[in-house]
Structures are given as structure tokens and as C-alpha cells.
């Protein structure tokens, strides 16, 4: 069995194991006392404590030093749990050398947040050879490269894991963070330290600040062994290596991560106090020399054709790599060109991911089920005879909406082709008509909500006059399905993220009348204290899990404004929009007051809302409609009384001579394309406008400038040429 060997000198690798220990699965394997801890005499406890401590130390030795564990992870976890329980009852037994005290990093209740010094971006996707040629063409045009000027682009496997940022200060690993939303990730330092692939220190030639970025993943063989072990012990079996890697890295207890075989490939970087190479390829090679694992399949290519050839070669070898990849990433090699190309929203212009085609399989669609979402949308879901698609067992697939079912003529009992691509929900692609059973009837989409019986209608968009593709339940507040979905969203990972309050618990609490609206979550503990039917006595609960849940809820009584706005589940308000709104208003009070006032479309508040960068009319309408509903305002009043909303930091102001200025480019530019000039100006905080007006601060004019130049002169606006512009932005 291959496992990662944690750093032997790292005490964090030997943390207590409480968070993940999986119940009864361990009985029989190790000498865990049979007597309940509560029933132990002090003498018995002392003897058992000593025996347990000895056994744990012996296992640590076998595991960490010899890489040859003699008991299962679950059995090991049970030993530690028992030791901790005994110490909880007999604190006098806690000695400095007890295994519970030799922890470097205490297992955190939840992960702390880390704001990335440089955002962690994602990649744009290419699916066809044409997309790849377009990418190369786009880059060439942007950079104004002549036909005979070379453009080198690297090609490397796109690892299907999760991205991880490693920050080294003065050549020591000080911080490891997941990508999170790209701006803020989770602090997983203690866990990353247990990954053998990740060096604790960098050599002397590394700059003072180095942020290495790469992919954390699990190799096929390690994944299979882990799953076999888990299955044998009645533990959790992971659907694929990616989930296993994510689940292992995001462990609250580093000791558990230490026992999971995680690996790492370095392929990018964030903040650096110096960049010692001039190309992507050489930087990655340098990472390799610093002791970081880098992918050996990276090559340099000089044309779109060469990139496609590299893609084919990697694709042909896919099955032999020993780890999952889902495509090939292309990156412009020269770092000065990367700098000039910059970014569009969340992805760099200088890189693209060429994805492998989706994987497909054939199976029988047994039923079509209609699910009701939090905004009342009726979504048809295909219940399938379980089938493996690209290594994952699939038993549900989306059918999108009523029109799609009709267009594909999908019927219950049909044999269908299902497809899975990357992270997306599996889809039904088409029906195998020859296999349609006799008597299969066309599917009739319900016109009443299956959850509450209210009418379900397709609204007509007043602007386009067209019918919405989505049929929605009109039940609103009386629809239990919508209420449950709203609550589920409220507690989901990117919203309140309450540990231990997942889908299952929300549904159960809702059905039993314990939680009907968000505020109820925060009064749960107080009500429980007064209630005769305690949470700890419910099936599946106990004193510890109830206490943990209450603690997890308490931990969320203070919440960031952006998270709260996102958690409300307002239509069209995703995480990014929620963040924009939070940054624009700063406080909950300011936000709530403004969007309530903005219900009056003639009020200044309405115009201010629409004037926020990134907020359009659709969002503005959805937000004001939400606040215009009295029942929403009531629910919010109750919620706000229970929680404390943190003030949002305004968007970081960019320091540059053109920040906040409105710039117009006119005439032809010779040293850069219009796109590049615009992107550069925007990245420095300027607004680029297409025409000159009184609001214009600066006009950059090249040869051939005409009417705009004249207008600028009339309005007395400063006009400079391209060289002066470059001098200004480059500070020359
Ligand atoms: S480069 C600024 N290279 O793919 C560009 N990403 O879909 C940073 N990924 O978030 C990414 N293998 O987690 C890069 N060789 C590779 C990669 C890779 C996997 C992941 C990464 C990224 C995601 C984007």
C-alpha cells in the first residue's frame, strides 16, 4: 500500500484523531476497552490509559517511521478517541507526553479563511481544435505579432484534483490555502504539511516570498487502496480520486490527512518577491529544482498544430499516467507576454484548458422525477439504472426543463445515453429509439407543483414577450419544497456553511417544525434547552453531536455581509454579485435601507443601485422585489436580531496615476492593440470609454485621430500620445 509519508519532524502529522473517527467500524482490531468510560474506576482508567498510550506510540512508530501501518486507520482513530475520552473524565491522567499532548497544531473547529495575496484564477476552456486555433490567433492579435514572429506556448496535463497555494516566507512553508472562491480560500496549512510531496523549506536561491500554486490530487493506485480499506472498515467510499483528494485535504484533523495518500504538482505561482526566470517552462523547471514535484509531460510548442499534437499525445497516454486528468493546459511561455496579455474577469488571456470530450454511457431511465427548487423552479430529473460513466456511478441526470424533454422525446422506460463532463451534473444526451419499450408514453409535464399542489406556470418575460423555459410553482411561502430549498441554500457551503447542518438535517428539522425560517436556526439551542424532546435524544443524535451542532451554529452568529447576501438566495444573486453589493454598501443597514427604498423606481436609491459596477437591471429588480415582500422583510428582521453582520471592506483601491479616471483611446496605436491598451488601463483602475464627453479625464490619441480629438480640444480635456501614455502607466 502506498501512502504519503508525512514529515517525521512535524508534530502536526501526529494530531489527535477525533474529527473523522468512524464509529463502530473498528471493533475487534485493537484493544479498545470494553467498559464504558463512565463506568471505569480510577485505577482501571489509569491502567488502560497507560496501555493505550503505549499502543498509540507503537502504531505511530510503525506508520510514520516504517511506513508500515499494522492497524487500520479507523482502529487507530478509535484508540485515540478512547484515550481522549478517558482523559476528559480523568484529567489528572493527562501527562505532557500523552499522545493527546504531542500535537503541534490543535485540530481546528473549522478552517480559518485566507485572503489570497494574488487571486487564484480559473481557466477558460477550449473543446475543439478550432477553439485552440482561435486561442493562438487571439493571443497573436492581442500582442500584434507579425506572421513571422514566433510564439511559444507550453502544453501540460490538466490534473483533476483541487488547487492549492503554498506560501513560503524566507524559504519556510508558512501557509497553505485552498482556492475557495478565488479571493478567499481555506487555511489548510496543518494538512498540507503532512503531504510528503510538499517540501517544508525551499533552498537558498528561492526569493523571500514565494507562493507556489499547483494541484493536490490522489493517484489511481492510492485511491483504490484507500477505498478498499474504507469499504472493508465500513467507512466512507469516495466516488473518484478528486473527491477523495478534496475530502482528505479538507479534514479538520491533520492526523487524518496524514494518513491519506495525497500528492502535489506545482504549475503556477501567486505572489513572488522576485521571479527568477523569464518563461513559464523555466519557472516550472526551477520549482522542480527547489524540490517541488512538477509534471514531466510539459512541452513547448510553436503553433496551434503543435499544441494539438501535444494534446493527442497526452490523451493517448491518459490511461497510463496513474492519475486523473481532464484535459491539457496551454500557457504562453514568455512571462513578459503573459504580463501584457493580462486577464479577462477570472481567467488569464495567456492560458486555456483544452478539455477532453465528455464521457458517455448507456442505461435505462426508470422514472422522471420533478424537483422543486428554492425559487419554485420545477426541474425534471432522470432517475437512472445506476451506470458507471468515466469511473463514477451515476443514478441521476438532469433533463433541464420541459422543452428539452419534448425536444429529445424522453420517456420513462427509455434507454438513454448519459454524459458526464468534469464537474457538471450528468445529462441525458439522447434516447436510443430502437430500444424504446412498447407502450412508452410521452412524458406529461405537471402543471401543478408536486410539493404543494399550487399552479405551476411559465411566466412571460415582459421585455421579450417570450415564455420562460422554466415552469415555476406559484405557491411561494406555502410551498414546503421551496422553503426547504431556501433553508438548504442558506446553510450551504458558500453561504452560512454550518458544519453538521446539511441537507438531511434541514429536511428533518423542517418536517418536524423545528426550523421553518433562517432565524430559527439561531434560536434552536435556546428552544432545545426549554423543550422536553431534546435534540440529543433524537434518532441519529447524541449529546456530543448536539453540542457540536450548537457550537457550529454559534460560530456563525457573526457573518460576513457578502455571505449573508448570498445566503438569502435571491434570484440572480450569486457569490460574485453578493460580493459586489456588499462592497458597495459596506453594512447590512445601508444595503437593506437602499434596496428597500429602491422599490420606488423613481427614487435615487434605484439609480444608485443600477450604477454599481457589475450590477445590471435584472439583479437590481430581483433584489428590490425580494425586499418589497413584507414576509421577506419580517423573516430578515428576525434573523438580523439573532446575528451580527460584519462590515464589508470596500473594493481595494488601485494605486496608479490613472485610477478612477475615464480614458478614451482614439486614432491608431502602434505599440499595442486597442484591446491591450484597454485591458491595461482597466487593470490600473481606469474606466475606458468609447466617446469623449465632459466626463472624460484623458484622451490618448494616435495618428489619424479625428473628431474625438477635436471634441477633446473643445472641452479642454488633456490629450497625450501613445508614448506619453506608456510613460505614464509604466512610471517611466
Ligand atoms: S494553471 C492562472 N495548470 O484547473 C492559471 N491549472 O480549470 C492557473 N489545473 O483552477 C491555473 N491542472 O486547479 C493550471 N497544469 C495546470 C492545471 C491546472 C489542473 C486546475 C486548476 C485550475 C483549474 C482551472
Image (tube, rainbow, N blue to C red):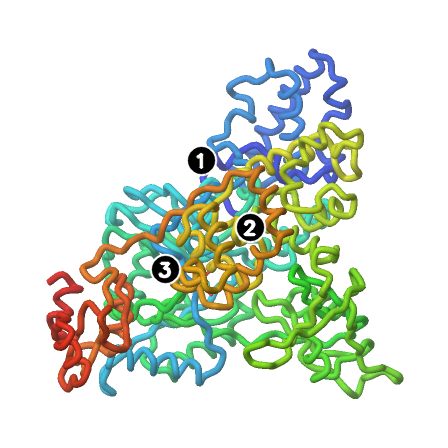
User: What residue is pinned by disc 1?
Assistant: 10
Residue 234: horizontal and vertical position, in percent? 73, 46
Residue 396: horizontal and vertical position, in percent? 72, 66
- Res. 53 image quadrant: top right
**Number of the label disc, if any, that sits on residue 495:** 2
The relative height of residue 18 versus residue 491 in the rendered view (above or below) is above
The relative height of residue 336 versus residue 254 in the rendered view (above or below) is below
Of 310 and 709, the residue lying toward us: 709
Query: Which callout, 1 or 3, points to the residue nearer the camera?
Result: 3
The relative height of residue 293 versus residue 431 in the rendered view (above or below) is above
Q: Residue at x 59, y 81 (%)?
A: 465
Q: Residue at x 13, y 72 (%)?
A: 716
| Cα distance between the residues tagged 1 and 3 | 26 Å
Q: Which residue reaches farthest right?
A: 439
Of 231 and 695, the residue lying toward us: 695
User: What residue is pinned by disc 3?
Assistant: 268
Q: Is mark 3 within 8 Å of ligand 1?
A: yes
Q: Secondary structure at mark 1?
A: loop
Residue 647: horizontal and vertical position, in percent? 42, 43
Amino acid at each position: 500500500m502506498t501512502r504519503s509519508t508525512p514529515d517525521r519532524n512535524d508534530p502536526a502529522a501526529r494530531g489527535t484523531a477525533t474529527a473523522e473517527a468512524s464509529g463502530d467500524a473498528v471493533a475487534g482490531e485493537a484493544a479498545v476497552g470494553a467498559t464504558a468510560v463512565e463506568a471505569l474506576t480510577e485505577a482501571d482508567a489509569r491502567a488502560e490509559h497507560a496501555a493505550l498510550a503505549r499502543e498509540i506510540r507503537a502504531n505511530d512508530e510503525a506508520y510514520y517511521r516504517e511506513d508500515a501501518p499494522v492497524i487500520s486507520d479507523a482502529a487507530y482513530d478509535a484508540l485515540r478517541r478512547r484515550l481522549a475520552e478517558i482523559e476528559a473524565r480523568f484529567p489528572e491522567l493527562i501527562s505532557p507526553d500523552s499522545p493527546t499532548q504531542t500535537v503541534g497544531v490543535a485540530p481546528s473547529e473549522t478552517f480559518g479563511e485566507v485572503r489570497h495575496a494574488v487571486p487564484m484564477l480559473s481557466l477558460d476552456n477550449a473543446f475543439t481544435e478550432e477553439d485552440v486555433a482561435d486561442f493562438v490567433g487571439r493571443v497573436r492579435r492581442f500582442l500584434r505579432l507579425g506572421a513571422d514572429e514566433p510564439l511559444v506556448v507550453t502544453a501540460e496535463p490538466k490534473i483533476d484534483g483541487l488547487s492549492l497555494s503554498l506560501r513560503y516566507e524566507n524559504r519556510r512553508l508558512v501557509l497553505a490555502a485552498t482556492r475557495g472562491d478565488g479571493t478567499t480560500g481555506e487555511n489548510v496549512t496543518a494538512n498540507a504539511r503532512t503531504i510528503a510531496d510538499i517540501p517544508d523549506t525551499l533552498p537558498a536561491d528561492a526569493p523571500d516570498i514565494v507562493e507556489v500554486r499547483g494541484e493536490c490530487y490522489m493517484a489511481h493506485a492510492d485511491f483504490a487502496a484507500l477505498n478498499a480499506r474504507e469499504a472493508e472498515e465500513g467507512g466512507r467510499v469516495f466516488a473518484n480520486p478528486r473527491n477523495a483528494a478534496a475530502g482528505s485535504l479538507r479534514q479538520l484533523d491533520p492526523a487524518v490527512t496524514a494518513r491519506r495518500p495525497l500528492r502535489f504538482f506545482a504549475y503556477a505561482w501567486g505572489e513572488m518577491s522576485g521571479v527568477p526566470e523569464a518563461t513559464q517552462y523555466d519557472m516550472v523547471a526551477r520549482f522542480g529544482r527547489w524540490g517541488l514535484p512538477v509534471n514531466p509531460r510539459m512541452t513547448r510548442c510553436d503553433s496551434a498544430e503543435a499544441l494539438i499534437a501535444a494534446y493527442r499525445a497526452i490523451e493517448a497516454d491518459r490511461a497510463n499516467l496513474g492519475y486523473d486528468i481532464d484535459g491539457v493546459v496551454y500557457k504562453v511561455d514568455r512571462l513578459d507576454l503573459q504580463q501584457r496579455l493580462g486577464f479577462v474577469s477570472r481567467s488569464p488571456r495567456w492560458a486555456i484548458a483544452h478539455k477532453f470530450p465528455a464521457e458517455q454511457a448507456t442505461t435505462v431511465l426508470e422514472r422522471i422525477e420533478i424537483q422543486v427548487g428554492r425559487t419554485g423552479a420545477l426541474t425534471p430529473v432522470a432517475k437512472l439504472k445506476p451506470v458507471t460513466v468515466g469511473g463514477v456511478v451515476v443514478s441521476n441526470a438532469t433533463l433541464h426543463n420541459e422543452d428539452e424533454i419534448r425536444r429529445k422525446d424522453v420517456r420513462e422506460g427509455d434507454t438513454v445515453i448519459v454524459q458526464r463532463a468534469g464537474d457538471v451534473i450528468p445529462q441525458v444526451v439522447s434516447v436510443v429509439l430502437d430500444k424504446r419499450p412498447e407502450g412508452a408514453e410521452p412524458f406529461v409535464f405537471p402543471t401543478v407543483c408536486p410539493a404543494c399542489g399550487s399552479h405551476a406556470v411559465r411566466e412571460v418575460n415582459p421585455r421579450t414577450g417570450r415564455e420562460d423555459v422554466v415552469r415555476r410553482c406559484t405557491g411561494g411561502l406555502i410551498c414546503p419544497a421551496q422553503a426547504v430549498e431556501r433553508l438548504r441554500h442558506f446553510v450551504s457551503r458558500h453561504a452560512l456553511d454550518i458544519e453538521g447542518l446539511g441537507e438531511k438535517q434541514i429536511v428533518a428539522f423542517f418536517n418536524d417544525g423545528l426550523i421553518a425560517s433562517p432565524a430559527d436556526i439561531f434560536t434552536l439551542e435556546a428552544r432545545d434547552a426549554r423543550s422536553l424532546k431534546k435534540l440529543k435524544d433524537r434518532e441519529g443524535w447524541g449529546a456530543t453531536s448536539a453540542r457540536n451542532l450548537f457550537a457550529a451554529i454559534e460560530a456563525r452568529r457573526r457573518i460576513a455581509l457578502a455571505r449573508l447576501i448570498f445566503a438569502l438566495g435571491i434570484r440572480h444573486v450569486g457569490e460574485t454579485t453578493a460580493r459586489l453589493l456588499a462592497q458597495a454598501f459596506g453594512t447590512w443597514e445601508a444595503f437593506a435601507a437602499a434596496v428597500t427604498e429602491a422599490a420606488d423606481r423613481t427614487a435615487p436609491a434605484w439609480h444608485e443601485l443600477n450604477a454599481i459596477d457589475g450590477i445590471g437591471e435584472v439583479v437590481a429588480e430581483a433584489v428590490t422585489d425580494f425586499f418589497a415582500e413584507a414576509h421577506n422583510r419580517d423573516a430578515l428582521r428576525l434573523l438580523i436580531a439573532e446575528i451580527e453582520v460584519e462590515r464589508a471592506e470596500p473594493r481595494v483601491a488601485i494605486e496608479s496615476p490613472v485610477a478612477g479616471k475615464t480614458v478614451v483611446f482614439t486614432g491608431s496605436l502602434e505599440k499595442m492593440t486597442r484591446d491591450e491598451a484597454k485591458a491595461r488601463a482597466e487593470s490600473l483602475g481606469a474606466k475606458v470609454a468609447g466617446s469623449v464627453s465632459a466626463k472624460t479625464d484623458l484622451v490618448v490619441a494616435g495618428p489619424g485621430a479625428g473628431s474625438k480629438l477635436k471634441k477633446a480640444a473643445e472641452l479642454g480635456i488633456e490629450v497625450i500620445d501613445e508614448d506619453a501614455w506608456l510613460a505614464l502607466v509604466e512610471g517611466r
